[in-house]
Image (tube, rainbow, N blue to C red):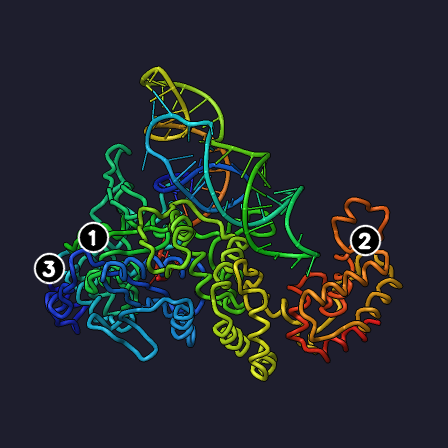
Amino acid sequence: MDYNKLAELLFPHITKDPLEYEAIYPERKLPEGAKVTRLGPSPTGFIHLGNLYGAFVDERLAHQSGGVFYLRIEDTDDKRQVEGAVEAIISSLEFFGVTFDEGASMEGDAGDYGPYYQSQRAEIYQTYVKQLVQRGQAYPCFCTEEELNAIRDQQESLKENPGYYGKWAKHRNLSFEEIQTRIDQGESFVIRLRSQGTHDCPEEEIRTISVEDGIRGVLSMPENDQDVVLLKANGIPTYHFAHVVDDHLMRTTHVVRGAEWLPSLPIHVELFQTMGWTLPIYCHTAQLMKLEDGNKRKLSKRKDPELSLDYYRSEGYHPIAVREYLLTILNSNYEEWRMENPDAPQDAFEFTVEKMSNSGTLFDLDKLNDISKDVLVKIPADELCRFLTKWARTYRPELVKLFEENEDYLMKILNLGRSGEKPRKDLIFAKQIFEFISYFYDEHFKREDAYPENVSEEDAKTILNAYLCTYRHQDDQTQWFNKIREIAANCGYAAKPKDYKKNPDQYKGHVGDVSTVIRIALMGRAMSPDIWEIQQILGEEKTKERIKKSL
RNA sequence: GGCUCCAUGGUCAAGCGGUCAAGACACCGCCCUUUCACGGCGGUAACCCGGGUUCGAUUCCCGGUGGAGUCACCA
């Protein structure tokens, strides 16, 4: 068979020599040890926590080493394009602090190794495929879907491995004439790799490949024997081929991807070998899984709204908190480092792939929340204020006016109890924060809790009445509290909890119960920061008004 | 089913032949406090099973079991 002739028949329009691309995309001039990484999302628009988790690894590896982190859109599947998806991906990642040095962007392409949309690189892939055909390492296959299904059914009934390989690869050795005839008849075809591997021998003779994974150490598995599709009928490559060509030409040094790619590693190894290129360093990350209702439920990534990045964004988690959480599960020594360096910026941490876990990690919302509290307590009120307003603008537009009308008021609220040695840590995410402070706004104020059981309706009235009568807005905290003590004593409640504890029979309760009554009248709930401070923010008028309403 | 990955408390996770088997979250208790919270102190709780190797295995090897992933002209 004259492979050159075949190559011309198949790709008459391809005239470039592959070497030209080597010249167009030369080795990058980077300092020793600099890593080049990439994120290669497919534009379905759906991006989840797992993607972000991987993106952080890419980003850290590149930026810690003075390398390059770029974005490549893997849009080789025309059935899965979603309108506006690329913008959604970029904006989502940007929101969580992932920024690229080069590649696809809102404005288009930026960088010397583009185009960064695989759909725009057809000619490049075809040039290399043509070369493979010329060398006899790839061939056209005209099998229809039905034929492929038939092959698989047969393999199934014979209990043989499914796939297009060895003796099952029926178009592997078509004659030139037959190929020409089929093409003349307008049959569509794909280009397949002529795999050099074989599993058609005793088990112990099957060759294995051995690859050193950045995270998992040495990986060995049987070599590939599948004649995988390189170029689809539409002339666009499959992921496998696009990955190999792009990561070579874009000079990627580290390929970070999920463990779901592990099974196809042999394919990629064979492809790199037949192209004569050196393998990048693969880093296969563990899958991210999820915890739900206290029961563990492992789930695959796709379509779970709880795992979607948008979910955390709409709940109003702060990007720094999400990043902090992800970093703790990404590198086992991050938390330790954080304890020693409570105020250091996240990027000061030295991230290493060796410290990455390689077993699946359950997503733990409790932990995220806890970390989020720690993160938010360090963010100044004015910044938090802006964050809240920005969040409201997209997710709770009806609140924007409320926030913007009186920013001073919101600032004071957010700052409540957050200064001093032991700041309160009760702010977690925007949605929760609003819930938490909603009683400051009349239109969102509602009675949520009931008075303590040991306080009768009558006592409650008496307490509130006395409170209203003696209330002086100018009182300082001590004066104010002494009055409450007095009221408590007058109504048969211990002025000090210790007294009550000593002689529980002598009292109906203690001053804490009395302040709970006041708290519920004012805030509608039994839990809130310090009452006196809240009153100072609320103002005299509103404070009195609420007490009156409860009478 | 084939192939692959993984396996320490409820969760995340140190450990890399000899440890009373760290720590964090969650949970429980106590203390502090004018209530709530914050904080402090303490507690419950783990090496999947069976064989080896070894003076000695959570750690190394083999085999089970369990969980996960993957077997497309999807990525």
Instruction: Give the numbered dot on residue A2.
Output: 3
Would you place residue A501 above or below residue A467 in this image?
Answer: above
Q: What's under tag 1, amino acid-wise?
A: Leu
Q: Residues within 10 Å of mark 2 (few under 14, many from 20)?
A: many
The quadrant in which residue A100 appears is bottom left
Q: Chain of mark 2?
A: A
Image quadrant holding the C terminus of chain A, namely bottom right
Where does label 2 land, which residue? Answer: A509
Q: Position of residue B44 (x, y in %)?
A: 59, 34
Can residue A69 be seen here? The reply is yes
Q: State the CA–CA distance, disc 1 to disc 3.
A: 30 Å
Q: Position of residue A412 (x, y in %)?
A: 58, 74
Of label 1 and label 3, which has the lower sequence position?
3
Q: State the CA–CA distance, disc 2 to disc 1.
A: 74 Å
Q: Position of residue B12 (x, y in %)?
A: 46, 46
Residue sitting nearer the eye, A101 or A432: A432
Which residue sits furthest right?
A: A458
